[in-house]
Image: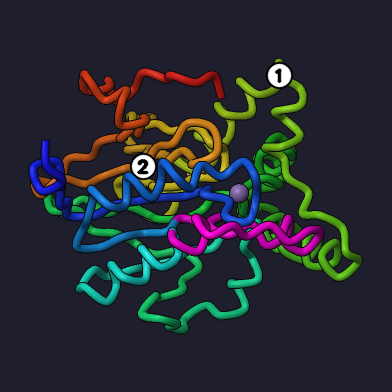
Amino acid sequence: MSDSAQHRRYRALFLSDIHLGTRGCQADLLLDFLKLNDAETVYLVGDIVDGWRLKRSWYWPQEHNDVVQKILRKGRKGSRIVYAPGNHDEFLRDFLGTHFGGIEVVDTIVHEAADGRRYLVIHGDQFDVVIRHAKWLAFFGDKAYGLALNVNTVLNLVRRKLGLTYWSLSAWAKLKVKNAVSFIGRFEEALSDEARRRGVDGVICGHIHHAADRDIDGVHYINTGDWVESCTAVAEHHDGTFEVIRWVRPEQQVDPVPANQSQVAA
Ligand SMILES: [Mn+2]
């Protein structure tokens, strides 16, 4: 089959947690994906470049360059590229509201789907603190909740100044496998609560390396997954429906892969 036959153009594509600059990043698979998939708008939903890791030891093979070039090229060829940084690329949070190389940098943004539904696009690390202290935050209410989000930002700014790594709840939870399941559940709940609070229909996020597309109490919760473990992206079709794409090596692409069936244990 030729490339043009396999080539797809979606209304929007959402990618997160690529972690360029780390050995775990599956750049070869991502290049393959980017070659065959295009969109009117490409959202980079955080942790695209792993600034924390790069600061400690420089790892930047040609393939990682190629990924950046491929994304910039999509911008030049007419795709709108929107970048909402995460915790690993939070150095870009100093550039919110700016453009570079044709890329818009935003903290969060609302994406309007073809069917009119509105989605909050956000990396999601902003809610680590909320998840950790869900009980007392619920008790003290909205003000404490807003305060906790600010504390999280300041805390990590201080850690950065001290040269410590960003404290990552997801990394911590993964070390303790039995906590991971409840962590994922609470993350999904916190993000869908935020969508409800903001009066939108759904949320599209990343951060926990766990792709999803489901309804949580009337909120459409979508997670883009990652390009370290599961190699997933989310596409919006031209009718406003969404799909989790799980990308596998070309030689394995015999049958279409069921969207919600995990091939790799997260
Ligand atoms: Mn993250």
Quadrant where the C terminus sits is top right
The residue lying toward the viewer, choosing from 20 and 254, is: 254
At label 2, which amino acid type do we have? Ala
Provide the residue designation for mark 2: 233
> Between disc 2 and disc 1, whose residue precedes?
1
- The yes-or-no answer for disc 2 within 8 Å of ligand 1 is no
**Picture quadrant where residue 178 is located:** top right
Residue 56 in magenta?
Answer: yes
Provide the residue designation for mark 1: 177
Quadrant where the N terminus sits is top left
Label 2: few (<14), some (14–19) or many (≥20) C-alpha neighbours in 10 Å:
many
- Residue at 62% from the left image edge and 62% from the top image edge: 89
The magenta-colored residue range is 45-66
Residue 262 versus residue 1 in the image, above or below: above
Residue 140 in magenta?
Answer: no
At label 1, which amino acid type do we have? Val
Residue 87 seen in render: no
Residue 251 versus residue 242 in the image, above or below: above
- Residue at 79% from the left image edge and 58% from the top image edge: 57
Label 1: few (<14), some (14–19) or many (≥20) C-alpha neighbours in 10 Å:
few
Name the spot of residue 35 as percent of width and height, x first: 27, 52
| SS at mark 2 in the image | strand
Tell me whether the residue at label 2 lies in contact with that at label 1, contact meaning CB atoms closer than 8 angstroms: no
Foreground mark, 2 or 1, reads: 2
